[in-house]
Image (cartoon, coloured by chain):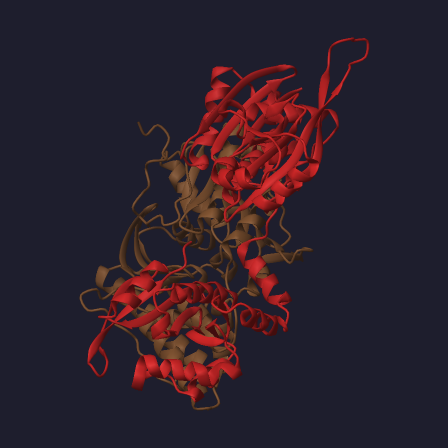
Amino acid sequence: MRIDKNVEDDGVIFMSIKEKDDEPVSEKNNEKDVTILAIESSCDETAAAVVRNGREVLSNIISSQIALHTIYGGVVPEIASRKHVEKMNGCIRAALSEAELTLKDIDAVAVTYGPGLVGALLVGVSEAKAIAFATGKPLIGVHHIEGHISANFIENKDLEPPFVCLVVSGGHSHLVVVKDYGEYEIIGQTRDDAAGEAFDKVARAIGLGYPGGPKIDKAAREGNPEAFSFPQAQIPDAEYDFSFSGLKSSVLNYINQAKMQGNELNSNDVAASFQRAVVEVLAGHAVKACKEYGYNKLAIAGGVASNSALRELLEKECEKNHISFYRPSPVLCTDNAAMIGAAAYYEYKKGVRFGLDMNAVPNLPLGDRERRFHAGKN
Amino acid sequence: MKILGIDTSGLVGAVAIADGDLLVSQFSIQYKTTHSEIILPMLKDVCDKIHLDLSSIDAIAVSKGPGSFTGLRIGAATAKGLSMALDKPIIPVPTVDAIAYNLYGVEKIICPMMDARRNQVYTGLYTFVPNTPEGMSLERSFGMQVIHEQFATSVSEIAASINEIGKPVVLLGDGVPVYHDILEKELKVPYSIAPFHQNRQNGAALVALAMQYAKEGRMISSDEFAPEYLRLSQAEREAKEKEKAPSGEVESRKLEARKNPGIIRIREMTAEDIEEAANLEKSNLGKEAWTQKQLLDALTRDDTIYLVAEKAKRIVGLCGVQNISGDGEITNVSVAKDCRGEGIGYKMLKQLLERGRGIGIADYTLEVRKGNEAAIKLYQKAGFKSEGIRPGFYDEPKEDAEIFWKRKEI
């Protein structure tokens, strides 16, 4: 894996992620190959990728605006949407040129159509539809979280359903059984805050800033995870559901109290103890689900899946319980388009095609398919 | 020259195709539909009906803004996608210019106005100037002259600019029906309003103007194109305002308030206000009131905002919020008993909510005695929704607290 980075004049970071170092892209397409151009713009990364047969990433371009939003303490939807319009074409062009292909060689255009920020999603959706229409190629809408889950197919060429997947990101905390390609059963989800959201808020409260996940992860390495015992909520009657709101409040209350009483706050200890409480619940639920549902494969996905404490704990627990543990490399855990291309491939094989009336669906539910945009639905 | 035009800057969604001197097709819908769902199906319909081979298009014209931010991006991303896939340039057309071009040949002042909310409009001033083509005697051709480039301003400002020119004016655009009353009051020149077949965004006018631009070489590559919003995002505006707020502002406002007794001024609480504010709290809340020390404490923190309402040199209202990691906890809302029913609470709260965004508050929450109907009505008016009960939260008398939230709209 190699990442070429370039910071542009406006603070946006342009990245090209190569799976293998210095290896030229493999020869022209075989006739049976399916090559997909994928586009993602659901939050603050503009991304485009070319993916062959769902698992081979020919190019993976990410234009990250994270630096622009840091001063506001979180993603500003209007700023994100504006940047998407500016950056999208450059990303697509770079993705095609790195794959050494043109639009003619592409078999389908895939795009994230939800969930996410509606204004941001609309940029990718409008662009993808226009390209699909102008080139006459099929159009495939992809669920953002299904993309994250599918990142595992890129990283682990041997992974096939069924397996259990723990999806944790800024906006999502789901425990999902992947029954088959594109078939999902949600067995647990958050009742309130997503894990990533709790990370962001706690990070802000102890002055680490945005984005919270990586900053807490780093601070926690210097702290004592046993310093405090923050509550780990269990939901009665829904043993796989999560609740991070109580934990978050308890940490925030502790911080406020310490401030009021003028006590010195060891933010590394707070970060480490908070992180321990989150990852123990996440890992505990995930491993339990594997055992009770009888699956011996567990995968993780989403931004929080790159958290080192979560990875370590899951590795340990999976080994103890004879479960194979799969995880995408950190760069595939962030928002990217390669994962959208991976998910789209299996939809393509099933014959799923979207019409030009496809719209962005900001609260698109996982698993429950939005069929109203499918082509030929009448 | 064959040009495809797209306009999604306002309520109108339009596609048009012109080939040289011929308008081959136009399709326009002005209805509450989602541009993102209809614009490409509309284009596909048109292409099918006129058997258009898309690759025969020479350029894609698009309304570049101003307009609805989301609408502009749908048009821009669609145009950029088409432009990249077809490898054809983009002709960006200023939205207000394209609207003005509806009135070809009109030698009066032309003033399109797009509603930008809160008495603001996106507007510009234009007129058509006649020329006699070479070798002709009676024929006239008109060129559109831009008197004032498109910009964002208040309705009163643009009315004043029109008065200054002093010539009859034709008004058009979706801002006209919204601000008709203000215009009637403030315009000092004869004015007319264009009828509906020529008073909104129009795909045909857009491509007609784009044809002119094409001749002048005003085309760019798809990668370079981005909409022109004429306005910063709200977050950027707030950040800028915060930066430039002068320190003497509070003082000058105080002076002004003294000159105008009876007028209610909402301003930030200062240390000098503490004693009066604490007295106000006390007379309203008794034992539950915040003390001077608590108020002073709150004032000195950088994660709080405290506002007071001043009337005739007297503090008649107080409210405050503390930012707890993005959640704004509203700690106080108090209005002097003899000044209630004057809308002071709502005014304060509205300012508090707006200013809170500037210190990073996304969602607001507060607790209120379940039986305090007046307060609950105020919070509901300000957009708060009840999300639960905290049983027995208040003492003397024992009463449940109702928990209200105002969550950020995405």
**Residue A246, image x, y percentages:** 31, 73
**Residue A63 visible, this angle:** yes
Which residue corresponds to the image point at 81% horizontal and 9% vertical from the top-left? B135
**Residue B93, image x, y percentages:** 64, 33
Front one among A8 and A287 = A8
Front one among B394 and A167 = B394
Front one among B18 and A353 = B18
**Residue B131, image x, y percentages:** 76, 18
Q: Is B98 drawn above or below residue A151 in the view shown? A: above
Letter of the chain in brown = A
Left/right of residue B193 with respect to residue B375 in the rendered view = right
Q: Quadrant of residue B217?
A: top right
Residue at the far right in the pictured view: B135
**Residue B391, image x, y percentages:** 20, 75
Left/right of residue B124 with respect to residue B353 in the rendered view = right
Chain B colour as displayed: red
Residue at the far left in the pictured view: A237
Front one among A114 and B358 = B358
Q: Is B168 drawn above or below residue A295 in the view shown? A: above
